[in-house]
Image: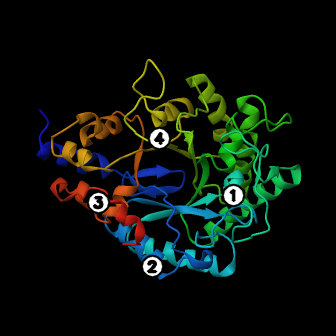
Amino acid sequence: MTTVASSASRAAEILSRPITLNGLTVPNRIAMAPMTRMFSPGGVPGEDVRSYYARRAAAGVGLIVTEGTYVGHDSAGQSDRVPRFHGEEQLAGWARVADAVHAAGGTIVPQLWHIGMVRQQGQPPFADAPAVGPSGLRIDGTEGSGRAMTQTDLDDVIGAFAEAAAAAERAGFDGVELHGAHGYLVDQFLWAGTNRRTDAYGGDPVSRTRFAAEIAAAVRANVSADFPVIFRFSQWKQEAYDARLAETPEQLEAILAPLAAAGVDAFHASTRRYWLPEFDGSDLNLAGWTKKLTGKPTITVGSVGLDGDFIGAFMGQGSPVQGIDNLLDRMEREEFDMVAVGRALLQDPEWAAKVLAGRFDELQPYDAVSLKSLS
């Protein structure tokens, strides 16, 4: 029977190991998952945002993946409180965030984001900008108020991602993450449910991946060779939790291979529950399959440390499937390389330090009230 002491020792040993992502050495295996916070008026991250990320780096988070930041395309977002990754004031604010995280001993990458057909026209920061997507369809398959993208649109968005990545390197960030998950623009191209195009960007899985691969290639060409490019993807979508890009490992490989060839250095595989197997006949989760198919480092995510049941499992109670030993077992056999923690880190900035030190009894269960502030 695994004891709390042995779990604590294993957590310290396994999670404290450094890992290399292209030219970046991350000091440990814990990442902060990207979470939209909407505390950046005018799209400018201020002192509170700087302190929010720095606190978590100081408490042992090895890699900060920022909340989604809008790239420089008018249709990219729909809130003037979500940070932007373009504009002099916005980028100056982000440079201060990166400096603070580095001073605290962490590493940091911005998540670059375009929401596509999720956008409601008339919303800030650019109220007149239309929603755009591969086929003008929303996640539920209905026609929205936007339109299908032209080649000019595609080229403009690809350029916006590439310029944002270059700006991240100039601002002192350690890499970038491309948001290709959860039903936003890049994912709308990947998924047959929203991509009905009949040109080179639609059809089979490889063709549906072309837009994402061209973004990755443009980013790769616009930054240094050793600057890490991470790609986040998911099977599920907002309000379509049963959606799947791939029903088999072969279909998944058809999607991932062009991205790896385009210059993606690591994949961040977003699932709702990390312990669930992705395909029949194997215990591998989505990150595990991604690493097996591409050979690239992977980050797993999905309900890590989210609730009291998980904390109980840390303490040797409740379901071991969701507990720390299951997570550590998977990391020890190199199913995936890092674990991203989301809402548990909103609740408790010290979460990583407590886990690395075996202070499981001090972990705090998640409470949605943590969403209301940048603690």
Please name the residue shown 58% across and 32% down the image.
244
**Closer to us: mark 4 or mark 1?**
1
Please name the residue shown 53% across and 39% down the image.
296
Label whose residue precedes the other's in the sequence (3 or 2) = 2
CB of mark 1 within 8 Å of CB of mark 2? no
**Closer to us: mark 3 or mark 4?**
4
Please name the residue shown 19% across and 38% down the image.
318
Counting every numbered tag in the picture gives 4
In space, the residues marked 1 and 2 are separated at their CA atoms by: 27 Å
Please name the residue shown 72% across and 49% down the image.
217
In space, the residues marked 2 and 4 are separated at their CA atoms by: 29 Å
In space, the residues marked 4 and 1 are separated at their CA atoms by: 23 Å
Q: Position of residue 320 (x, y in %)?
A: 23, 35
Element marked by disc 2: helix
Which one is nearer the viewer's eye here, 7 or 134?
A: 134
Identify the residue under disc 3: 351
Q: Which mark is residue 119?
A: 1
Identify the residue under disc 4: 271
Label whose residue precedes the other's in the sequence (1 or 3) = 1
Identify the residue under disc 2: 48
Label whose residue precedes the other's in the sequence (2 or 4) = 2
Label whose residue precedes the other's in the sequence (3 or 4) = 4
Question: As shown in the figure, which amino acid type bears the numbered disc 1?
Answer: Arg
Which one is nearer the viewer's eye here, 208 or 80?
A: 80
- Crowd band around label 1 with a 10 angstrom C-alpha radius: few (<14), some (14–19), many (20+): many
Element marked by disc 1: loop
Question: As shown in the figure, which amino acid type bears the numbered disc 3?
Answer: Trp
Label whose residue precedes the other's in the sequence (1 or 2) = 2
